[in-house]
Amino acid sequence: MKNALLIFALVGLLLLSGDEPMSLVFALGVAGALFRKSLLVWTAKWRSSWSFIVLGIALGIYTEVCALLGNMERPEAERILLDPRPMMDLAFGFFFYGLLILVWFAYFRHRAFSLWQVFLTSGFFGILTEQFNPAVGGPVILIGVFMNPLSGIPMALLIACVYAIFPTLAYFLTRHTFQAQRRAERRDVALVFFALLFQWAIFGNIILPFLKRILLD
């Protein structure tokens, strides 16, 4: 029954992707759950924890490609991307997702996180950081959760999933490569959350302007 629901969801998302490419991000998560056993058999041969970095960045770039496809019909000034030009957006995305994945990698080496801890932490990070993106509504996202929950909660959940699927799936498939035995506690979850916010601030205020200066000037 569970697999039947996953198949139904996957087919629906793939059909929807023609009009809304971002649905492919959710299709990735559903496919990961549906084919989890086969995927784990495939990744069981991986021994290095660096495989998490490679897979995490690859899935992050996949997420960015979906966002890029969903914005191509919009005027450049209205595109919700790191840069309105496709190649520059992907180049900047490599550094954005790379830095985010490196933060998780550093913590995975010392603590064993649950999949739910990774998913919820990444998701809330996405919701919080998107408050500073006026193109998607800015601070009205969290306000809408309380003031207009019928539309605010679904919007917040969609944003959370976009940010949570790629690191969670990468960790799920490479978790066996990490040697950490001590389980992550609430303090560890709080630390990684603030580390993610710190890297986001570093990327937006230092790395991204630097990249734009050397690549676009």
Image: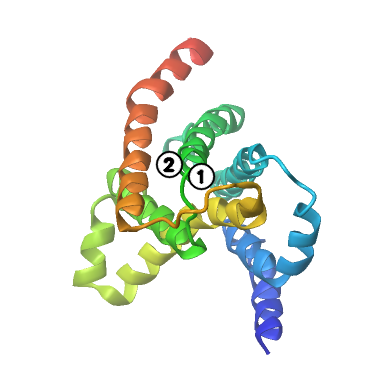
Quarter-of-image position of residue 35: bottom right
Amino acid type of the residue that numbered disc 1 sits on in the rendered structure = Arg
Which of the pair 205/182 is nearer the observer? Answer: 182
**Residue placed under numbered mark 2 in the picture:** 78
| Disc 1 secondary structure class | loop
Vertically, is 152 above or below 199?
A: below
Vertically, is 27 above or below 121?
A: below
Judged from this view, the residue extending furthest toward the front is 181
Name the residue: 59% across, 62% down: 23
Percent across and percent down for residue 90 are: 59, 33
Label 1: how many Cα within 10 Å (few below 14, some 14–19, many 20+): few
Which of the pair 49/92 is nearer the observer? Answer: 49
Amino acid type of the residue that numbered disc 2 sits on in the rendered structure = Glu
Percent across and percent down for residue 171 are: 58, 52
Which of the pair 163/68 is nearer the observer? Answer: 163
- In the displayed structure, does residue 168 sit left or right of residue 11? left
The N terminus is located in which quarter? Answer: bottom right
Name the residue: 32% across, 25% down: 205
| Disc 2 secondary structure class | helix
**Residue placed under numbered mark 1 in the picture:** 74
- In the displayed structure, does residue 186 sit left or right of residue 13? left
